[in-house]
Image: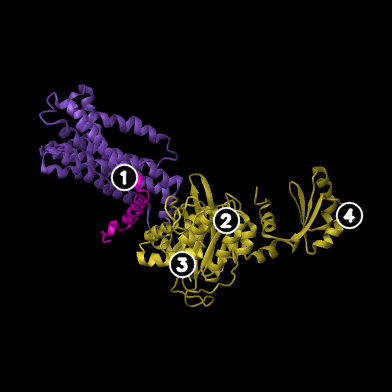
Chain colours: A yellow, B purple
Amino acid sequence: MFGVTRNAAGVLVGESVASGLMPEQPSPLRAPAGGGALIEARDLRKSFGDFVAVDGISFSIERGEVFGFLGPNGAGKTSTMRMVACASPPTGGVLRVLDMDAATEGPAIRARLGVVPQEDNLDTELSVLDNLLVYGRYFGLERGLLRRRAEELLAFAQLTDRARDRVDPLSGGMKRRLTIARALINQPDVVLLDEPTTGLDPQARHALWERLYALKRDGVTLVITTHYMDEAEQLCDRLVVMDGGCIVDEGSPRQLIERHVRREVVELRFLVEADKAAAAVLVESLSDHVEVLADRLLLAADDGDATAAAVHAAGVRADAVLVRRASLEDVFLRLTGRTLED
Amino acid sequence: MAAPAALAAPMRVVEHEWLMTRRLWQGVVFSMFVSPLLMLGAMGLGLGGLVDDGAGVGGTSYLEFVAPGLLAATLVQAAVADSLWPIMAGTTWLRTFHAMVATPLRPRDVQRGLVLWQVMRSSAIASVFLVVAAVLGGISSPWGVLALPAAVLGAVACAAPVAAFAATRETDVSFSLLMRLGVTPVFFFSGVFFPVGELPDALERLIVLSPLFHAVELCRAAASGTASVALVGHVAVLGALLVAGLRWGERTFERRLGV
């Protein structure tokens, strides 16, 4: 529906594609046509005065993949995204987007990007349809073409029956879907989504994810920042974990989980701090990694049920016991020593 | 739409402003067209009747005196107001300018587009105003058509620096202050309603600092068909202000939208 169908690139770990990106040096590892990194950053930096927002990060994003930047607020995700969107010039390092230099070829790059910003910036006084049309004109697209595309995109965003309505009274979820539809008006090679579901209720989040899956199926390359673990796990083929302006690791959600944590986690919740402290000593030998949080203990385990039974046998009585699959949340905790909500 | 290449990108911003105007036309019609004409009626005909019972102003009727002045003042006031709150909406409240610069448009295209829009908007207001003023007998010379570019020059010469300033602000607290302490006194003391010669000498010397004064002088000269060397000076002052405002705005828009 939107652009050509693209092959999802294989999972790449580390900086294996950092070199040989120029089109005149084709790599045998890559597909001959349309291959190569769409976005490539080396030692990318951004500072605002003395404050370093992005501290020398390197990554590369392939055509057709869904790539995530995961991290807490202030990790440098949005600054990175704004540089990739050519909305903010890098302070240092190399950033190539669609084989162009982000520092000097901003307008040409932006012509081929779709941007979904963290804060909605729709024309709330205008109608849903007008928002699509006027935005398309910023790209210099011809009006007849825009009318046809807008119709398709309204259907995609499930907003056809609201086309003539003003944007202002629409729900948060509808506005987000419209912002995404608007970002597709120029049939972009890459869509950048900064915290796409922040502030939405669960139902609206799932509706939005479903739309993003649809784009993924159509082969659109998506770059997403999120501080939601479930979002990263659901959507991303590959992601980097950011903290304090740096990338702390990179891989597929599955790889990151396998690399850093056990298969399952036993959560022991305590209402009384002293009980937790006492239990922490007792369970220490039952797991090779015990995380002590404010109200609970997390025990890494290959077999959660067995560990839970062992905890019980050791005489520990938690107020609640939960066995669950390890998630990116645990990976993040392991990598940074902090929870995402800190 | 065929536009010179340099204007192609700013013209897309103009299209946005035009669309907004079309969608919100009721408010626009009143503030842009009806209210200036009410002013012209009240001042030119009402107050004019009183003044003309004396001897008019320097041999012309009060309507002929005040019409070109009101034209310049209306345009400057509208252009300044339109370069304050709508800029804040674009940079901060609705962030619509951020949407623009996510596309091939650059911050300076947004800035130029907004100034270009002021040229068009001011021209539209001035045209209606001039026609009505002429019908009422406020324009005595065919050279009066030149009052249009003169008034528009005055309007954008003010709009450009004001927009540049607005782009540096995080909130609109200073805007009402600027209107009350800047625009309003200038409106009353720039020779719109009475010749600046009536002012105390100290104040009369200061009035050359008012952009509106230069615009009023140009409009009045056009409306009465009297040329003088001083006109070159008035054009130069407004031209310099416009260029300075454009340069400053290029920097402030870049800093606001592109860091």
Please state the horizontal and vertical placement of residue B199, each as a whole percent of the image. Answer: 21, 24
Residue corresponding to mark 4: A314
Q: Position of residue A101 (x, y in %)?
A: 42, 62
Cα–Cα gap, marks 2 and 1: 40 Å
- Per the image, the residue denoted by label 2 is A197
Instruction: Please report the bounds of the magenta region as a residue range.
Output: B1-26
Q: Main secondary structure of the magenta part?
A: helix
**Amino acid at the residue labelled 1:** Val
Q: Name the residue located 67 percent from the left edge and 59 percent from the top edge.
A: A328
Q: Indicate the quadrant where residue A300 lies.
A: bottom right
Mark 1–mark 4 distance (CA, rounded to whole Å): 81 Å
With respect to residue B113, does B221 lie above or below?
Answer: above
- Report the residue at 74% width, 49% height from top: A293
Residue mark closest to the camera, 2 vs 3? 3
Q: Earlier in the sequence, mark 2 or mark 4?
A: 2
Helix, strand or loop at label 2? It is loop
The crowd level at tag 4 (other Cα within 10 Å; few <14, some 14-19, many 20+) is: few
